[in-house]
């Protein structure tokens, strides 16, 4: 399975590890799983450092539209992407541009630690 994820309801986070060859269909399934599970509003940590991603610009636009449709129904949680390749960086930047109307923070990091710290810093303080 190219995208394996775990959910923490307590911390309202989803940790998604991408591995092998990840397709647009895999990403679309993840988006739909988040919507159906009620986790679209959770913070997401996407680790793409073990994946090969070859998704076209047109497919990215479709994924952005799918994400924006979810955002029409509920607020999306922030998303941190761990990237270690220029191609993955390009795709995530295109996705960020395409989902700008969904108004949620997206950031790109070179390591899991930095991504996790950023997500933690976004949580409301009691």
Image (cartoon, grey):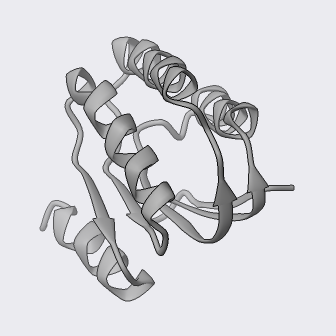
- Is 2 positioned to the left or the right of 10 in the image? right
Give the image location of residue 90, x and y in percent.
39, 50
Give the answer, above or below, for where 53 lies relative to 123: above
Residue drawn 27% across and 73% down?
Answer: 120
Q: Residue furthest left?
A: 125
**108 and 10: which one is in front?**
108
Q: Above or below — where is 62 with respect to 84? A: above
Residue drawn 32% across and 26% down?
A: 98
Q: Which residue is the extreme one toward the right?
A: 1
Q: Is residue 12 at all visible to an observer of this figure?
A: no
Image quadrant of residue 21?
bottom right
Residue in view at x 74 percent, y 31 percent: 25
Residue 58, position as x, y percentages in the image? 52, 20
Left or right of 92 on screen, residue 39: right
Give the x, y percent position of residue 19.
74, 66
Q: Note whether 92 is above or below 38 in the view shown.
A: below
> Which of 28 and 104 lies nearest the eye of the viewer?
28
- The residue located at (31%, 50%) in the rendering is 78
Q: Nearer the viewer, residue 81 or 33?
A: 81
Residue 119 % position (x, y): 29, 67
Give the position of the N terminus as an image quadrant.
Answer: bottom right
């Amino acid at each position: 399975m190219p995208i394996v994820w775990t959910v923490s309801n307590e911390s309202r986070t989803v940790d998604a590890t991408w591995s092998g060859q990840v397709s647009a269909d895999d990403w679309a399934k993840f988006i739909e799983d988040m919507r159906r599970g009620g986790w679209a509003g959770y913070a997401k940590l996407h680790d793409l450092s073990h994946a090969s991603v070859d998704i076209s610009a047109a497919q990215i636009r479709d994924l952005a539209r799918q994400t924006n449709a979810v955002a029409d129904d509920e607020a999306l949680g922030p998303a941190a992407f761990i990237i270690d390749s220029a191609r993955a960086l390009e795709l995530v930047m295109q996705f960020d541009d395409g989902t700008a109307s969904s108004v949620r923070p997206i950031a790109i990091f070179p390591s899991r630690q930095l991504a996790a710290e950023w997500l933690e810093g976004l949580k409301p303080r009691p």
